[in-house]
Image (cartoon, grey):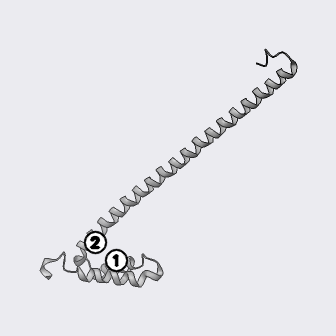
């Protein structure tokens, strides 16, 4: 339209309009690219969060299995080792929860003390 316009004023007007539209198109492309980048960043964060959750679940499973194995062998462990395990487990929680946690562990061990040794029933 700029080339075929009858006057120089019209030509400049069409060239300015063309420049303005090209600039807007460039801005729109930048916004679209930023949107894609933001979506990819959120997806990457979500993927990382899910991976972390899966690792946490796997670690929790391993810890549960190790804990169960210790409890199944509890009565055959030397008393000094039992005390060390009890002290270590009782100190895993926060300082304010230590007494309550130690009580829970002691009650659990007392309740299940004969579970793995049929001769002590």
| 98 to the left or right of 13 | left
User: Quick one: label 2, few (<14), some, or many (20+) residues within 10 Å?
Assistant: some
Sequence order check: which comes first, mark 2 or mark 1?
Answer: 2
Residue reaching furthest right? Answer: 8
Residue positioned 30% across, 70% down in the render: 67
Which mark, by number, is residue 38? none
Looking at this view, is 92 or 29 the one in front?
A: 29
Q: CA distance from mark 2 to mark 1?
A: 9 Å
Residues marked 2 and 1 touching at CB (< 8 Å): yes
Residue positioned 47% across, 81% down in the render: 95
Pointer 1: what residue? 85
Looking at this view, is 37 or 11 the one in front?
A: 11
| 84 to the left or right of 114 | right
Q: Quadrant of residue 57?
A: bottom left
Pointer 2: what residue? 70
User: Quick one: label 1, few (<14), some, or many (20+) residues within 10 Å?
Assistant: some
């Amino acid at each position: 339209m700029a080339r075929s316009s009858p006057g120089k004023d019209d030509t400049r007007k069409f060239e300015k309009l063309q420049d303005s539209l090209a600039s807007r198109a460039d801005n729109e492309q930048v916004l679209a690219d930023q949107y894609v980048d933001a979506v990819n960043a959120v997806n990457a964060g979500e993927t990382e969060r899910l991976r972390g959750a899966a690792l946490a679940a796997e670690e929790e499973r391993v810890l549960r299995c190790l804990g169960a194995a210790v409890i199944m062998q509890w009565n055959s462990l030397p008393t000094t080792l039992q005390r060390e395990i009890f002290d270590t487990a009782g100190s895993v929680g926060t300082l304010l929860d230590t007494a309550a946690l130690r009580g829970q562990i002691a009650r659990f061990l007392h309740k299940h003390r004969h579970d793995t040794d049929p001769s002590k029933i």
